[in-house]
Amino acid sequence: MSIEHVDILIIGAGPSGAVAAAYLHDKGFKVKVVERNSFPRFVIGESLIPRCMDHFDAVGFMPCLEKKGFEVKTGARFLQGEKVCEFDFSKKHTDGWDWTWQVPRAEFDKTLTDELERWGVDIAFEKEVVDVKLTNGKSITTIKNKKGDTSEIEAKFIIDSSGFGRVLPRLLHLDKPSEIPKHSSIFTHVKDSRRPEGWEGHRITFDIVSRETWLWVIPFSNGYTSIGYVGPTAYLESFGGNAEDKLREMMKLSNHYHDRFSGLPFEFEPKMIKNIAKSVTQLYGDGYVLTGNSAEFLDPVFSSGVTFATESAHLAAKLITKELQGEAVDWETDYSKYILEGVNVFSTYVKEWYTGNLQKIFFADSENPIIKSQICAVLAGYVWDKTNPFVKNHHRLVKTVARITEMEKENASK
Ligand code: FAD
């Protein structure tokens, strides 16, 4: 069997693989992306947060994305019964992008891969990575096409951007249980024929129907809207019937949205993903690095998935460039520690969301604009800015402010 030789093999052509490919191709490396699907393909993860715009901008994707007219997202609204908490990214503590997009990912991801191909990046669609052998810092990857024929690729470095495919975590046994509670999700798209006029029809909203269960409503500029629930696995499973019955029944939990979506046909049978959170024992090894969802996934509640995917891919690509140019790279400090620092901040917010502490702050009777701007910066994905006390002291600050909020509420009711 003949072996193809490349500098860098990237597994998966989602945002993580695309950002890494763009960066490394621009540096003159021989890059090959192997993607098991043909594009466009459906993937969930439609609400972006501003930090990922830094990465798309840095690797030259902004012009092709801007042409698409995706729905602009300038903040996020959270509802809890009659209470409303609205974040505006232009009022955040950290400097940086104050807008992003809410996107049908099939079209968004295809825009990125079309642009890569236009630049001359080699993307092998409908080829699945089925095996990887790592020896002395070199790798031999076996890929299989739709007919079942296999071939091999030798690469100096592998970037695993395979998302929930989790290729290297599976093959190298790197999986470890996540500390995030076991949540599942059920979702679909609808043609939003009763979309209200004006801003209400376009704004992204999270309707909190109980402490651990919430609905997302993500309107797209093409007239369709993504709707989906996240909640404890056992709770979602307690709804009877097939996936469509379950989601229709769950839509009744939302007073705010029930009428808008009631009876509308679902564009596809709702998909259910169980026990969403994923974690690994290590993010890199000799000749490979994990980026994006393949490395870690927390929870959809703060829409951080794509941003971590592009943050990690961009950083990994920079470090690989250094290493292949003969410079020393400290992967532990410069990659693992950095990425895990951001993951840990978000992880606190996800956990404190589900303990209810963060919800106490979001839905407090009175609002502190400074605290709000600091939390807003976290929700925008700027989780490495240590000038933000809600980043620097994330472990205790959310708890402390939640307690104060509670005490204020108790005092007010006396
Ligand atoms: P992906 O986009 O998943 O791309 C991985 C690619 O690898 C795929 O195209 C796949 O076909 C390919 N692949 C897999 N296995 C192989 C193989 N063996 N060989 C070759 N190719 C392979 N994130 C957000 O930012 N905002 C959200 O609102 C959001 N909501 C979410 C809701 C839910 C219910 C879930 C589960 C996740 C959500 N996410 C969200 C997370 C988001 O889906 C991911 O973080 C994001 O898609 C990660 O991008 P990626 O490039 O790492 O992987």
Image (spheres, grey):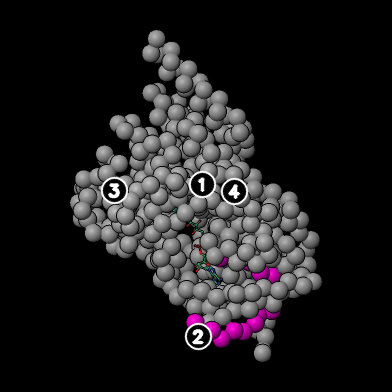
Direction from residue 377 to residue 267 in the image, left or right: left
Q: Are marks 2 and 4 in contact (CB under 8 Å)?
A: no
Judged from the image, the secondary structure of the residue bearing numbered disc 1 is: loop
Q: Give the CA separation, mark 2 to mark 1.
A: 37 Å
- Indicate the position of residue 72 as horizontal and vertical percent values: 36, 52
Residue underneath mark 4:
178
Q: Are marks 2 and 3 in contact (CB under 8 Å)?
A: no
Q: Quadrant of residue 320?
A: bottom right
Q: Residue at x 58, y 63 (%)?
A: 166
Q: Give the CA separation, mark 2 to mark 3.
A: 41 Å
Query: Within 8 Å: ligand 1 and the Cβ of disc 3?
Result: no
- Give the residues in magenta: 146-162
Q: Is residue 12 visible?
A: yes
**Compared to 54, does 142 lie above or below?**
below
Q: Which mark is residue 249?
A: 3
Labels 4 and 3: the sequence-earlier one: 4
Residue underneath mark 2:
147
Q: Give the CA separation, mark 1 to mark 4.
A: 9 Å
Judged from the image, the secondary structure of the residue bearing numbered disc 2 is: loop
Residue extending farthest top: 414
Q: Which mark is residue 182?
A: 1
> Viewer-nearest of labels 2 and 1?
1
Q: Are marks 3 and 1 in contact (CB under 8 Å)?
A: no
- Indicate the position of residue 394 as horizontal and vertical percent values: 59, 34
**Compared to 368, does 156 lie above or below?**
below
**Quarter of the picture holding the N terminus:** bottom right
Mark 3 packing: few (<14 Cα in 10 Å), some, or many (20+)?
some
Q: Tell me which amino acid carries mark 3.
A: Glu
Labels 3 and 1: the sequence-earlier one: 1
